[in-house]
Image (cartoon, rainbow, N blue to C red):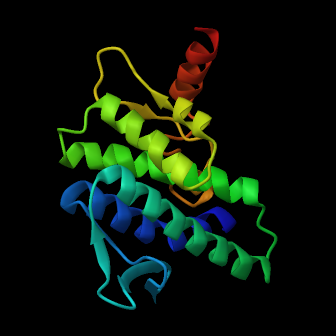
Amino acid sequence: WLTRTWDLLCWQPIYVALVSISGFQSLPNLRNMAQYLQPCFVRGFRFADQEHIQGDYTILITKAGRQIRALFDFYQEQMNEWIRIRPGFTHQLMSDSILACLLRLQQHFPQLTDAIIKEHASLWLSALGLDERHIDALHGVPHEQPLKLVRKSCCLVYKCEGRKLCEDCPRAAKNRQLIMQKSNG
Protein backbone atom coordinates (compact mmCIF):
# COMPACT_ATOMS: atom_id res chain seq x y z
CA TRP A 1 0.00 0.00 0.00
CA LEU A 2 2.98 2.28 0.35
CA THR A 3 3.47 2.48 -3.41
CA ARG A 4 -0.24 3.09 -3.99
CA THR A 5 -0.38 5.79 -1.32
CA TRP A 6 2.61 7.59 -2.81
CA ASP A 7 1.20 7.39 -6.35
CA LEU A 8 -2.17 8.73 -5.20
CA LEU A 9 -0.51 11.70 -3.52
CA CYS A 10 1.69 12.56 -6.46
CA TRP A 11 -0.24 11.96 -9.66
CA GLN A 12 -2.17 15.25 -9.77
CA PRO A 13 0.74 17.68 -9.30
CA ILE A 14 2.68 15.84 -12.03
CA TYR A 15 -0.22 15.85 -14.48
CA VAL A 16 -1.16 19.48 -13.78
CA ALA A 17 2.43 20.60 -14.36
CA LEU A 18 3.00 18.60 -17.53
CA VAL A 19 -0.35 19.48 -19.11
CA SER A 20 -0.01 23.16 -18.17
CA ILE A 21 3.45 23.41 -19.67
CA SER A 22 2.84 21.29 -22.78
CA GLY A 23 -0.63 22.56 -23.54
CA PHE A 24 -0.62 26.16 -22.34
CA GLN A 25 3.05 27.18 -21.91
CA SER A 26 2.05 28.16 -18.39
CA LEU A 27 2.68 26.96 -14.85
CA PRO A 28 0.39 27.50 -11.86
CA ASN A 29 1.81 27.84 -8.37
CA LEU A 30 2.11 24.20 -7.24
CA ARG A 31 3.82 24.95 -3.92
CA ASN A 32 0.60 25.20 -1.94
CA MET A 33 -1.60 22.99 -4.09
CA ALA A 34 -4.32 21.36 -1.98
CA GLN A 35 -5.74 17.99 -3.00
CA TYR A 36 -9.09 16.45 -2.17
CA LEU A 37 -9.39 13.01 -0.66
CA GLN A 38 -12.21 10.87 -2.02
CA PRO A 39 -13.01 7.38 -0.75
CA CYS A 40 -9.95 5.29 -1.76
CA PHE A 41 -8.67 7.98 -4.14
CA VAL A 42 -7.14 11.43 -4.33
CA ARG A 43 -8.97 13.49 -6.92
CA GLY A 44 -9.58 17.20 -7.27
CA PHE A 45 -7.40 20.09 -6.26
CA ARG A 46 -7.23 23.81 -5.70
CA PHE A 47 -4.49 26.38 -5.73
CA ALA A 48 -3.75 28.80 -2.90
CA ASP A 49 -3.68 31.69 -5.36
CA GLN A 50 -4.08 32.52 -9.03
CA GLU A 51 -0.37 33.01 -9.58
CA HIS A 52 1.02 31.46 -12.72
CA ILE A 53 3.94 32.10 -15.00
CA GLN A 54 4.27 31.77 -18.73
CA GLY A 55 7.35 31.19 -20.77
CA ASP A 56 9.68 28.83 -22.53
CA TYR A 57 9.23 25.18 -21.66
CA THR A 58 12.81 24.82 -20.38
CA ILE A 59 12.30 27.57 -17.82
CA LEU A 60 8.85 26.30 -16.87
CA ILE A 61 10.08 22.72 -16.43
CA THR A 62 12.92 23.93 -14.20
CA LYS A 63 10.51 25.92 -12.03
CA ALA A 64 7.94 23.11 -11.96
CA GLY A 65 10.62 20.61 -10.96
CA ARG A 66 11.64 22.74 -7.98
CA GLN A 67 8.04 23.21 -6.86
CA ILE A 68 7.11 19.56 -7.26
CA ARG A 69 10.27 18.38 -5.52
CA ALA A 70 9.57 20.65 -2.54
CA LEU A 71 5.97 19.40 -2.41
CA PHE A 72 7.01 15.75 -2.65
CA ASP A 73 9.76 16.19 -0.04
CA PHE A 74 7.04 17.55 2.26
CA TYR A 75 4.84 14.53 1.51
CA GLN A 76 7.73 12.23 2.29
CA GLU A 77 8.41 13.96 5.62
CA GLN A 78 4.73 13.66 6.55
CA MET A 79 4.56 9.99 5.60
CA ASN A 80 7.78 9.25 7.49
CA GLU A 81 5.93 10.14 10.69
CA TRP A 82 3.80 7.00 10.37
CA ILE A 83 5.75 4.70 8.03
CA ARG A 84 9.33 4.44 6.82
CA ILE A 85 9.55 5.64 3.22
CA ARG A 86 13.02 5.68 1.72
CA PRO A 87 14.07 8.54 -0.59
CA GLY A 88 15.49 6.11 -3.17
CA PHE A 89 12.10 4.43 -3.35
CA THR A 90 10.19 7.68 -3.83
CA HIS A 91 12.73 8.97 -6.36
CA GLN A 92 12.18 5.85 -8.46
CA LEU A 93 8.42 6.30 -8.30
CA MET A 94 8.75 9.98 -9.26
CA SER A 95 10.91 9.09 -12.26
CA ASP A 96 8.48 6.44 -13.43
CA SER A 97 5.53 8.81 -13.03
CA ILE A 98 7.18 11.61 -15.01
CA LEU A 99 8.07 9.27 -17.86
CA ALA A 100 4.60 7.68 -17.92
CA CYS A 101 2.94 11.09 -17.99
CA LEU A 102 5.19 12.28 -20.82
CA LEU A 103 4.19 9.26 -22.90
CA ARG A 104 0.51 9.89 -22.19
CA LEU A 105 0.95 13.51 -23.26
CA GLN A 106 2.47 12.32 -26.51
CA GLN A 107 -0.83 10.62 -27.32
CA HIS A 108 -2.61 13.99 -27.13
CA PHE A 109 0.14 16.18 -28.56
CA PRO A 110 1.44 14.35 -31.65
CA GLN A 111 4.00 17.11 -32.23
CA LEU A 112 5.87 15.64 -29.24
CA THR A 113 8.15 13.28 -31.14
CA ASP A 114 10.14 10.55 -29.45
CA ALA A 115 13.22 12.83 -29.58
CA ILE A 116 11.30 15.65 -27.87
CA ILE A 117 9.94 13.24 -25.25
CA LYS A 118 13.49 12.13 -24.42
CA GLU A 119 14.66 15.76 -24.28
CA HIS A 120 11.78 16.69 -21.97
CA ALA A 121 12.40 13.59 -19.86
CA SER A 122 15.99 14.70 -19.33
CA LEU A 123 14.86 18.22 -18.41
CA TRP A 124 12.23 16.93 -15.97
CA LEU A 125 14.49 14.43 -14.26
CA SER A 126 17.20 17.06 -13.89
CA ALA A 127 14.73 19.67 -12.58
CA LEU A 128 13.51 17.19 -9.97
CA GLY A 129 17.05 16.30 -8.93
CA LEU A 130 16.58 12.72 -10.11
CA ASP A 131 18.98 10.42 -11.92
CA GLU A 132 18.80 11.19 -15.64
CA ARG A 133 19.91 7.64 -16.46
CA HIS A 134 16.31 6.67 -15.77
CA ILE A 135 15.61 7.72 -19.36
CA ASP A 136 16.86 4.21 -20.17
CA ALA A 137 13.41 3.03 -19.05
CA LEU A 138 12.13 4.40 -22.38
CA HIS A 139 12.48 1.80 -25.10
CA GLY A 140 12.29 2.26 -28.83
CA VAL A 141 10.51 -0.85 -30.06
CA PRO A 142 10.90 -1.65 -33.77
CA HIS A 143 7.68 -1.21 -35.72
CA GLU A 144 6.00 0.46 -32.73
CA GLN A 145 5.42 4.12 -32.00
CA PRO A 146 5.66 5.87 -29.65
CA LEU A 147 8.35 4.93 -27.16
CA LYS A 148 7.51 2.26 -24.63
CA LEU A 149 8.07 2.71 -20.92
CA VAL A 150 9.17 -0.18 -18.78
CA ARG A 151 8.98 1.19 -15.26
CA LYS A 152 11.84 0.57 -12.87
CA SER A 153 9.39 0.10 -10.01
CA CYS A 154 6.43 -2.26 -9.70
CA CYS A 155 3.19 -0.80 -8.35
CA LEU A 156 2.16 -4.27 -7.07
CA VAL A 157 -1.41 -3.84 -8.37
CA TYR A 158 -1.31 -7.46 -9.52
CA LYS A 159 -1.56 -8.47 -5.86
CA CYS A 160 -5.09 -7.05 -5.73
CA GLU A 161 -7.87 -9.50 -6.40
CA GLY A 162 -8.63 -9.88 -10.08
CA ARG A 163 -5.76 -7.68 -11.29
CA LYS A 164 -2.89 -8.46 -13.65
CA LEU A 165 0.54 -7.01 -14.26
CA CYS A 166 0.41 -3.50 -15.74
CA GLU A 167 1.39 -2.94 -19.37
CA ASP A 168 4.59 -1.14 -18.31
CA CYS A 169 5.45 -3.43 -15.39
CA PRO A 170 9.08 -4.56 -15.15
CA ARG A 171 7.85 -8.01 -14.03
CA ALA A 172 6.02 -8.70 -17.32
CA ALA A 173 7.87 -11.22 -19.48
CA LYS A 174 7.83 -9.06 -22.63
CA ASN A 175 9.23 -6.12 -20.66
CA ARG A 176 11.96 -8.22 -19.06
CA GLN A 177 12.90 -9.24 -22.60
CA LEU A 178 13.12 -5.56 -23.67
CA ILE A 179 15.35 -4.80 -20.70
CA MET A 180 17.63 -7.74 -21.53
CA GLN A 181 17.87 -6.69 -25.20
CA LYS A 182 18.85 -3.16 -24.23
CA SER A 183 21.47 -4.34 -21.73
CA ASN A 184 22.96 -6.75 -24.29
CA GLY A 185 22.87 -4.30 -27.18
Image coordinates of residue 117 in percent, x first then y, are 35, 37
Between 172 and 92, the residue placed more toward the observer is 92
> Looking at this rendering, what residue extends furthest in the top direction?
185
> Looking at this rendering, what residue extends furthest in the bottom direction?
48
Image coordinates of residue 5 in percent, x first then y, are 60, 71
| Picture residue at 39% right of the left edge, 79% below the top | 43
In the rendered structure, the answer to whether residue 86 lies left or right of residue 168 reads right
Would residue 96 be seen by someone viewing this image from the given angle? no
Q: Is residue 158 above or below residue 146?
A: below
Would residue 56 be seen by someone viewing this image from the given angle? yes
Image coordinates of residue 118 in percent, x first then y, are 41, 34
| Picture residue at 55% right of the left edge, 29% below the top | 136
| Picture residue at 37% right of the left edge, 84% below the top | 45
Q: Is residue 11 above or below residue 134?
A: below
Between 59 and 159, the residue placed more toward the observer is 59
In the rendered structure, the answer to whether residue 92 lies left or right of residue 53 reads right
Tally of numbered discs? 0
Image coordinates of residue 181 in percent, x first then y, are 57, 14
| Picture residue at 53% right of the left edge, 21% below the top | 178
Picture quarter with the C terminus: top right
Picture quarter with the N terminus: bottom right
In the rendered structure, the answer to whether residue 115 lies left or right of residue 128 reads left
